[in-house]
Amino acid sequence: MASFTRIEESETPSIIVHPTHKLAKIDDNIYGGFTEHMGRCIYGGIYEPGSPLSDENGFRKDVIEAMKDLRVPVVRYPGGNFVATYHWLDGVGPVENRPKRPELAWLGVEPNTFGTDEFMKWCEVVGTEPYLCLNFGTGTLDEALGWLEYCNSEQDTYYANLRRKNGREKPYNVKYWALGNECWGPWQVEQMTKEDYAKKAYQWAKAMKLQDPTVTLILCGETGYSSWDYYVLKECVRWDVHGLSGDTTKSLIDMHSIHIYTADKDHLVNATAPRAAERAIQMTSALIDLARIENNVPTSVPKQTICFDEWNVWDPVRAPGEKGAEEKYSLSDALAVSVFLNGFIRQAANMGMANIAQSVNVISPLMTSKDGLVKQTIWWPLLLFAKYMRGHSIALNIRSPEYTGRTEPKWIRAAIETPYLDSSAGIDNKGYVSLAVTNVHEQKDFEVSLDGVKEGDVKVYTVSGDNVSVVNTAEEQNVGVVESSWDGKGAFTFKKHSFTMLRWKA
Ligand code: AHR
């Protein structure tokens, strides 16, 4: 939580940090990833058998190292839109027997040489948890239950035995399962009305929990501020369900998924667009409260959290999905990504997970080629957050001038402020405070009076570049992290179009 006071551009901005005012636990899962069978994300991204850059499993080692640098806690798979025609059985067993299928989300051919067991193995090598999304398009409930049994069952039953036959004795214990993806979207195979979706999600969720009561189920929301979100939450956030009934600590649905992509050609519109994400989180949280109140959910049932399982800068016209959505990210986009992340930290109390879309090659911070890996501009703020902004969010008071021009979407202007200085802060379990400050102004450095910073050794990590349009390529790394230090005394200057993280021991 941060308080914001708007000041004139002629005044001196200030930030007061309160390291002793912990607000909420920052769930590590907000630094989650997402790998979809789309473009070069799986094939040529995380999986490239035969490449000198791959290991004995065919996994790209440079990608694995990057995932480890981010300490990615959870990775969503196999889609995305792809999942609406995916049959998991096609992707298990001897590779030579696996069928090739037409792929209807991105209009390609799916070879199925990478499937559940390969993904689970990759997760083990990376040290991350799998998060699987169910096929709510052409899939059946039987198939979904079979997948759950294959992944999690220890019983002597058909799909658990199939897993054993395929070489894996122990269950994978997949905790996170999504009840479909963007089922509301007109691009979806088997697009649904909210009424049809809610009815189906309720029944599938009940069956999934009867088979494995330990799973965390994620409801398919939209943006978090639509009538779809209201309706499906109202119908599915329940505890009085057969199989759960009587237990006042459990509910049918554990998380609600929302997706937001932002982008604009004008820098300030682009960099402030992720303010919509923070407002969306607030609105979703209110809708969850409303569903609980209307459904008389006992307070002993933990509040459902938000699973922001697709977020990033993406313009699908500039980088079409059918062509692999290989966005080239500018410094402006890196600042936008830091504004998304600041919002997740300020809203830590509501956030159970977030997954940058996507982890490799497709609208991604990481781009592979046959020769190596390029870290795009957006990688750097993400890395700093993932490395340092852990533990608990802490209180902040910010006084800053505000950008008052056009916003995208338009409703941002009336719903939430768009300061030039966007900031969040946290304290980790070793007592290190991280203060993140994004200065989105294209021309102006801001000298900021900082209160609450401990004098002494303050580490400074800055992400910036010559101008907001610069990008990183294999030949030229125009944007990276510059490290310096500061004595913590007096004011600190946050340079124009920069992201800065200050870090000190409280
Ligand atoms: O991440 C790319 C696509 O964007 C996903 O497949 C879909 O869920 C969303 O529309």
Image (tube, grey):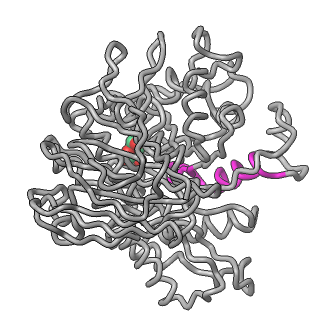
Residue 146 part of the magenta segment: yes
Is 65 placed above or below 266 here?
A: above
Q: Position of residue 192 (x, y in %)?
A: 40, 61
| Side of 432 where 438 appears, left or right | left
Q: Quadrant of ligand 1?
A: top left
Q: Quadrant of residue 26?
A: bottom right
**Who's the residue at 32% across and 56% down the image?**
490
Q: Position of residue 51 (x, y in %)?
A: 57, 10
Q: Quadrant of residue 207?
A: bottom right
**Who's the residue at 16% across and 66% down the image?**
413
Is 430 placed above or below 444 here?
A: below
Query: Is 480 or 319 nearer to us in this picture?
Result: 480
Residue farthest to the right?
156
**Who's the residue at 44% across and 15% down the image?**
369
Q: Position of residue 27 (x, y in %)?
A: 57, 59
Residue 439 part of the magenta segment: no
If the image is split into quadrants, where does the N terminus sit? bottom left
Is 359 placed above or below 199 here?
A: above
If the image is split into quadrants, where does the C terminus sit? bottom right
Q: Is residue 193 visible?
A: no
**Residues rendered magenta in the picture:** 133-153
Q: Position of residue 255 (x, y in %)?
A: 55, 66
Is 52 placed above or below 13 here?
A: above
**Who's the residue at 31% across and 31% down the image?**
327
